[in-house]
Amino acid sequence: MSGLPLFPTTVVGSWPRPDYLLDALKKRQAGRLTFEEFNKVADKAVLEALKYQDDAGIDIVSDGEQRRDNFYSFVTEKLDGVKLMTLAELIDLVEDKRHFESILKQLDVPAFSIKNATVVGKLNRRQPIALDEYEFLRKHTDKPTKVPLPGPYMLTRSMWVQGVSDKVYPSQDALAQDIVRVLREEVQDLKAAGCQYIQFDEPVLTEAAFKRDTKERTFMCASMGGSSGDAAKELLWASRLMNQVIQDIEGVNLGMHVCRGNWSRKEETLLQGAYDPLMPYMMIMKLDQLVLEFATPRAGDLKVFEPYKNQRQIGLGVVNPRSDELESPDFVVKKTKEALEYFQPEQIYLNPDCGFGTFAERPMNPPDKAFQKLQVMVEGAERLRKEYAN
């Protein structure tokens, strides 16, 4: 996009929620606040999240996903046919309850605080998914804005729960077509309103690629529906769904974020593996930008782009949102120079590995630490601009 400096800085989306917003969110979910009353509280939190980004010097801002319970369950407010259920409630629906409970414990998952949007009826947009978020943010900033949306594969995997959803949609494939329709409508509305950057979140791709038994019911993004067990089949299906959503849509920068889980600060509980098995499928997708983790060693290195030089923009993860350790500007510069072996300077955007508050009640870092990490990222970008200005 024109008007941006080299190595523009941005965020993946979420920001830690203040206590007063968490209180309002609980009241909203309990039916003690209307959607309009909750949004008045959330407006204040959005402006605070925006100020953190502005004070740090971020070039492309988000609203911090302050109105969202998490990065995908918030669609319950926006879509007909969806009910928000805790993992504790969903345990009653799985075939092997003891095994599922052991997985939650092993992966450090709080069953009562993580909620899953579950399809219980015919899917339709009751209201736009994120257009209201964008329109409020747009009134309060002159900077380019990014709107994250849950991706079609992730929504299909997470929202289709056997024993509930199959009463309406006999298969995940049947549900996927309505999800594609709903997301496509949303992208078109955001584009028409002037949104410059739309990011689809697809973390379940790594589960399909790295889990030895993808038929196993796991926590990863509450993917209760399971998969076919064939990684290549799942990844090809995800690629096709993405292309169906974005087909022939131009004039807006379309990206996809892929991580390995962001529900715990215990790195050993999160998925591990380089992007190699994902690369052919990500490159099939007609996206402008891939927003990827590279600050954490769990993500491998940038050599995976050797066969795909200069073919996409990259949202380069240069700080880890889950760690106490504060990265240095030198680290940001070093990681970016590694990326320059495979991308042109104007193709590289700098961002954290993931959001700082993917799940509302479980932020990865407090706001002051997250702010410091953004500052490091901005200082690294400024050094790079001086070096590569010509």
Image: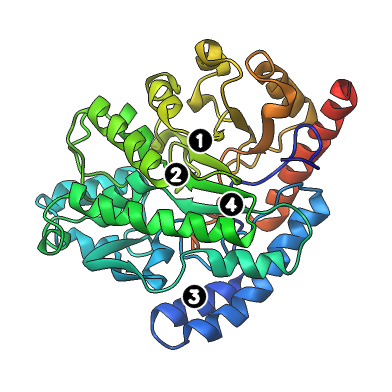
* Above or below: residue 42 compared with residue 318: below
The answer to which of 42 and 148 lies nearer the viewer is 148
Q: Amino acid at mark 2?
A: Ile
Q: Which residue is mark 2?
A: 246
Q: Which of pointers 4 and 3 indicates the residue nearer the eye? A: 4
Does residue 212 appear in this view? Answer: no
Packing grade of label 3 (10 A; few <14, some 14-19, many >=20) is many
**Real-space CA distance between mark 2 and mark 4, rounded to the nearest whole angstrom:** 20 Å
Q: Give the structural element (helix, strand or loop) at label 2.
A: helix
Amino acid type indicated by mark 3 = Leu
- On residue 13, the disc is 4
Q: Quadrant of residue 29?
A: bottom left
Q: Nearer the viewer, residue 34 or 285?
A: 285
Q: Which mark is residue 287?
A: 1
Q: Residue at x 50, y 26 (%)?
A: 299
Coloring applied to the structure: rainbow
Distance from Cα at disc 3 to Cα at disc 2: 32 Å
Vertical position of residue 118 compared to residue 271: above or below: below
Res. 25 mark: 3
Disc 1 versus disc 4: distance between alpha carbons? Answer: 18 Å
Q: Secondary structure at mark 1?
A: loop
Q: Amino acid at mark 4?
A: Gly
- The disc, 2 or 4, on the residue closer to the chain's N-terminal end is 4
Asked if residue 366 shows in the view, the reply is yes
Q: CA distance from mark 4 to mark 3?
A: 18 Å
Disc 1 crowd rating (10 Å Cα; few below 14, some 14-19, many 20+) is many
Q: In the rendering, at what x and y percent does residue 319 appear? A: 65, 36
